[in-house]
Image: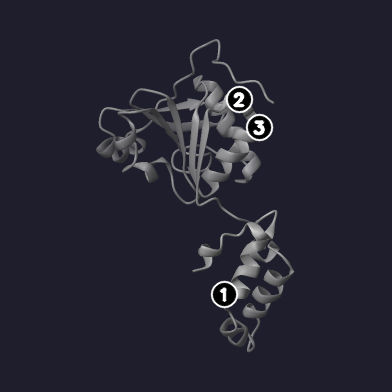
Amino acid sequence: MTAPMTAPMTAPSITPLGPEARDYTRRWLGSGEIAATTLPDGTRIRYVRAGSGPNLVLIHTVRTQLDLFQRVIPLLAPHFTVYALDLPGFGWSDLKPGAPKDEPTLRAALRAFIATLGIERPILAGESIGATLSLSLAAELGEGVERVFAFNTYDYLPGLERSNLLASLIIKSVRAPVIGPVFAALENRAITGGIMSGGFHDPRSLPADLLD
């Protein structure tokens, strides 16, 4: 199991932010901190910090930025030290030229962000790709992460077709021209259960009431 990360020996560098990167966020953040830090590879990351208590890092999904959590952070700040960041290439965070916005790239930046700010044993919470990053980084850091909350974890192509042979057959047929509506009309509890059971290591573990 990977050893917990320790705080950096020196304080993180703070990169100035222009008013356009602060004004909207300030309207909902109140007294929290809006700042940017530069990661070891030169990537500038905008983030907010608010509240006090156990460390909590919020991770947004694609096509959004840290302001996705504007209604959540004020509720969490009385109980946690809340950090939320713009992932690289989103909001006011940089993305190195030619770098992809894929899971490994974003995970490496998230890990560097946590290490740069010296955030010890964070709780990770994310939505969609943010949820996947929470889980994958927790698996990488082991005891360096206190807890994970993964909401609406994202999938990747070919999606549900990977579930099992039945899922592949039905979904491909539903998408087919002309005959697609015929196969869509065949959906029933048994077929739905057969497809969904592919998401379990033991297909018998699918809760029966989940189909009701």
Amino acid, disc 3:
Glu
Name the spot of residue 13 as percent of width and height, x first: 48, 19
- Crowd tier of the residue under label 1, counting other residues whose Cα lies within 10 Å: few below 14, some 14–19, many 20 or above: few
**Residue pointed to by mark 2:** 143
**One can see residue 210 in this view:** yes
- Crowd tier of the residue under label 3, counting other residues whose Cα lies within 10 Å: few below 14, some 14–19, many 20 or above: some
- Crowd tier of the residue under label 2, counting other residues whose Cα lies within 10 Å: few below 14, some 14–19, many 20 or above: some
Name the N-terminal-most of marks 2 and 1: 2
Question: Residue 76 appears in which quarter of the rendering?
Answer: top left
Name the spot of residue 88 as percent of width and height, x first: 53, 39
Residue 25 against residue 166 in the figure, above or below: above
Amino acid, disc 1:
Arg
User: What is the secondary structure assignment of the residue under circle 1?
Assistant: helix
Residue sitting at the far right? 165
Q: Residue at the spot x=70%, y=56% of the render?
A: 202
Q: Residue at the spot x=27%, y=39% of the render?
A: 28
CA gap, disc 3 and disc 2: 9 Å
- Is there a contact, CB below 8 Å, between mark 3 and mark 2? no
User: What is the secondary structure assignment of the residue under circle 3?
Assistant: helix
Labelled disc at residue 87: none
Amino acid, disc 2:
Glu
CA gap, disc 1 and disc 3: 39 Å
Given residues 38 and 110, the one toward you in this image is 110
Question: Residue 186 appears in which quarter of the rendering?
Answer: bottom right
Q: Residue at the spot x=65%, y=20% of the render?
A: 3
Name the spot of residue 67 as percent of width and height, x first: 37, 42
Front position among marks 3 and 2: 2
Name the spot of residue 50 as percent of width and height, x first: 34, 28
**Residue pointed to by mark 3:** 140
The total number of labels drawn is: 3
Front position among marks 2 and 1: 1
**Residue pointed to by mark 1:** 189
